[in-house]
Amino acid sequence: FFFSSRRRHTRCSRDWSSDVCSSDLAAQRLGDFAKVGAFLALFGIAMPLIGAALGLAVGHYWLGLGRGGVTLVAVLGASASYIAVPPAVRMAIPEANPSLYLPLSLGITFPFNVVLGIPMYESLAEWLSA
């Protein structure tokens, strides 16, 4: 199976997808996350809120969108930290510790956004458009 080997499957040494999976690397060093977990958990909740606040402001005041559009821009702003960051960090900073940024983005920020964030952003967009 393609992902069962730990060797690189592409020729480019900087291709983040050429590692079998960054989660393999993260699992090997998961204890590192426990050392700074409280700070990272707080950061993982604060960053989507900041991104959503910027998205709400841009969508409502600058773009003049309605409730649905403002909600969408807020969700996109809030989700930027777990959609774009893991591959960008992996490529830009190869020595970065994946046991810090993967659990943060996929274990804290993503579930927070899905369970609490999106309903909150939609309520705020409704409040702004009232």
Image (cartoon, grey):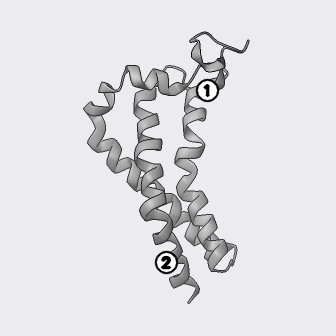
Q: Is residue 21 above or below residue 117?
A: above
* Mark 2 vs 1, N-terminal side: 1
- Residue 39, disc: none
User: Measured from the top left, where is residue 34 in percent x and y?
Assistant: 27, 32
- Judge whether residue 46 can be spotted in this image: yes
User: Measured from the top left, where is residue 4 in percent x and y?
Assistant: 58, 16
Residue kind at label 2, given as amino acid type: Ser
Residue 25 placement, left or right of 79: left
User: Measured from the top left, where is residue 48 in percent x and y?
Assistant: 47, 56
Give SS at disc 2.
helix
Task: Count the marks.
Answer: 2
Give SS at disc 1.
helix
Nearest to the eye among marks 2 and 1: give it. 2
Q: Residue 84 falls in which quadrant of the image?
A: top right
The crowding category of the residue bearing disc 1, from other C-alpha atoms within 10 Å (few below 14, some 14 to 19, many at least 20), is some
What residue is at 62 percent from the left and 73 percent from the top?
A: 70
User: Measured from the top left, where is residue 110 in percent x and y?
Assistant: 48, 50
Spot the residue most to the top: 7
C-alpha span from label 2 to label 1? 36 Å
Quarter of the image for the C terminus: give it: bottom right
- List the residue tagged with mark 2: 123
- List the residue tagged with mark 1: 91
Spot the residue most to the bottom: 130
Q: Is residue 2 above or below residue 91?
A: above
Spot the residue most to the front: 1
Quarter of the image for the N terminus: give it: top right
What residue is at 56 percent from the left and 40 percent from the top?
A: 85
Q: Is residue 117 above or below residue 65?
A: above
